[in-house]
Amino acid sequence: MSTEQNGAPAEAAPKPTEAPKEALAETPKQTATNQNEKPSKDAKSGAESKADKAEPKSSDAAGDKKLTGAELKAKAKADKAARRAQQKTSKEVAKGEAAVSSSPGQLGPSAGEVKAKGGKGKDGALAAAAAGRPVLLKAPPSAVVTEQKIQIPECFSHLSMARRIPMTQADKDVHPSVLMLGQQMATFTIDESITRLKATMLAFRKVIESYITPPGNVLARHFTPHVLNIQIEYLTACRPMCFSMGNAIRWLKLQVSKIDMDASEEQAKKELCQTIDIFIAERITVADEYITEQGAKHIKDGDIVLAYGRNTLVEKAILYAHSTGTKFSVLIVDDPYEQLGQQLAKTLTDEGIKVTYSGDFGGLRNHMRHATKVFFAAEAMFSNGAMYARAGACDVAMTAYELGKKVITLCETINITERVATDSLTYNEIDPERSSAAAFRLMFDATPDKYISLLVTELGSVQARSAPDLLRKLEEFN
Amino acid sequence: MDKYTDVNQLLARIQGVARRLVAAQPRELVIGNIVRRVLGLIRDEALENRNEAGSDESISSPVRDASPPPMSASVSSLNEATPLAKMGRPGLMNALTRTQSMFNLLADPDTIPPIWSTGASPAPGSGVSTPMADPQSTDVKALRSEVIDGIEEIMDEIRQVDEQVQAYSDIIIHPGDYILVHQPCKTVQRFLTRSKRKCTVFLVVDPSAHPAEDPYASFRKSMAATGSVVVNIMNTGLMAYMSRVNKVILSARAIMGTGSVLVDGGASVIARAARELGRTVIVIGGVYKLSPDNQIDQETATEWGNPSKYVNYSDGRMVGQVTVKTAVSEFVPSELVNTYITNLGAHSRDHLHAIVNDHYKEADIEFDLYGTIRK
């Protein structure tokens, strides 16, 4: 490591001299920033050494395998280093949209980096980081970088967090549609697991469409490591992947590898796009419709349905039940920090459903006493039957369980993961907007299977504990 | 106009004021507690004075003969709670020398309030107390200063609560603990600050508070002095944190003799979550918060308040069509609490009854503060 570090600056030396010239032409500001940033080298090197530590791990993670949380994090760290390398080049290229169409001179290091990454697989990440490091020393620390250093209490330091990465800092090979999606995810504009999944698949479809196999390569061999992985890394850096995305990406990589080597590029791309379309239709669109119907069947005349926050699937199920003429009312308990339940309240009252709304968990037991059924939509299901959902869901489910109310969880099978979570701190995400040096917010929690009466999926309604059986069922299909 | 001529008038007047206060804030049990403490104090002082004046008089007072007429007259207007109180009375009447005040207390609570507002207007009680007026009038002045002294003692006691409670912090807090508190009152804050042991405090804040202002800034600072960390938790469901938490400390609004606790809205679900995972739940509050009231239960305890806490009143669609409910305070059943810490020490649930009996007189416990509200 140390030798690389020493050798690196020499390699990087020519760049600063070359860059300002161009930058000067465009914006005089940039030289100023470059100068200002020099004193902060020390701060940088701290972060850098962090990245170094992460490297060995990340190199393992670079493979095709599904990533565990720890690996993801290590990877994210390596990404950060790589991105910083990009940062400089892309900054000089200037202004978001130009990131893709940059001049060849500046692309030099990053192009090499990309090759190293893809070509050698495991060693790639390491090499990339090494290549990135010299640039990194001079890289200007942006506001975002400091923002990322929010002090997280030590006991939560293992959890990941979404970060807003300026588009200019993204890898230049990130496809524009993915670039956009990353921003939407980082800002939680696209939030729910299933919507994120759908948007990702559609973005990847565009990536495939615009992909051109370089001469001497085959799509099946070249696409995943050289193109797809870059997109995934960027998305993961913007916001940790949700479990459904992990599942889908694994599936997509498998599909790419299955493509006939002899097929023409056009043919291969067409096939891939078709499979993605089918995937979206089967696993998301139709699944949602079926779950909506099945969920709605559980709502009977006279029921008082308790919903926590707002979730598209729950909303759909309630609206569907209403449209079939069932007479019931809805009790919404909300998370005061998100207040999405108010949206739901409005949507439902517009349809003429009677709604009672409680902004927080005060008097939850009183509400629960009145309720007859509780509906959740899972962000993910663990294979021990635990439900991964909006923070607070566990408390609501627990209260329901105690009062003997039926708890129904709606979930597409794509959200089922083979991982196991026995508590809420195994897998979770930190809310970047509300976490600071003094404040902290978890975004999810894990509800033990015993609180959940029924899991409604597109493959049928089962006990939460049977989630892994559904996974097995899925494997049989494929 | 507000001069009183004997103990009974004083008691009646205080009861009248008490009802007004309670009617204004029926969920604030501490009001009732303090009123009862003061009533008990007056009774004690009066008894002392009377005994000094000569016990023969009070025992052979004509009260018992005089009592029936106003009683029967007011029976028709008795509310449903007084017959219950009546049941317990005969025994007391014979046993205690303070029969007179007892009777006055229970005669007809609903007709008493006018007394204090109209000054010396005769109430059912007045007929009873007249015979006693002469022997007592001399004591009134002495009584007054003694009662005022007594009230000051109660005030002192309340003032010292925080300090006394603090003494137990090192027993409760262990090095490296993760302690979860819900909107801690000053008592709890001082309790935590006192301990010199390094711990991490998860502080559940009021979600409606503006994120920029930190009402606990000074608390955080003083905790940092001992190396402890205070983290504001911006979640309402705390189940996610429970696997990490060692102890949950709740600040009580009031503690019932049964061990149930009135807390700020949102704390109940925390106690439940803690219990579910077997975490210790500790309730902290001065003894003055310990209420002899037994009328409050799970169903009635939740106080619904300001609905615009989360829903903006300008949001017509929400205001017009949705029923919005926001709980201000709620109930934590006794089975969710492990230990109670007051200025008198740490108590188990079963011990609370004894403390209640130490602090309140039976006559005052039965005093129906809610008479006027229920109508």
Image (cartoon, coloured by chain):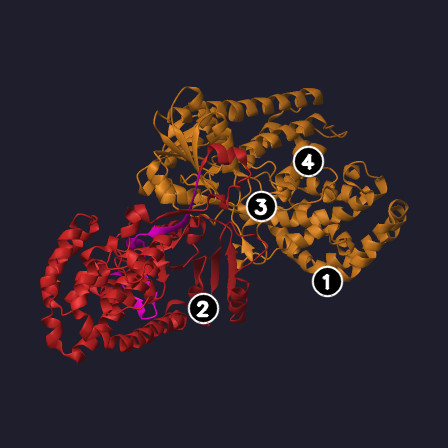
Chain colours: A orange, B red
Using the numbered discs, state the Cα–Cα distance from disc 2 to disc 1 in whole angstroms: 41 Å
Chain at tag 4: A
Disc nearer the start of the sequence (4/1):
1
Using the numbered discs, state the Cα–Cα distance from disc 3 to disc 2 in whole angstroms: 42 Å
User: Mark 4 — residue?
Assistant: A180
Q: Nearer the viewer, residue B99 or B25?
A: B99
Asked if residue B353 lies left or right of residue A148, the reply is left
Spot occupied by residue A418 in the image (x, y as percentages of width and height)? 46, 38
Disc 3 element: helix
Disc 4 element: helix
Same subunit, tags 4 and 2: no
User: Mark 3 — residue?
Assistant: A72
- Circles 3 and 2, Cβ within 8 Å, touching? The answer is no
User: Mark 1 — residue?
Assistant: A42
Q: Amino acid at mark 3?
A: Leu
- Labelled disc at residue B190: 2
Disc 1 element: helix
Q: Is residue B188 above or below residue A163?
A: below
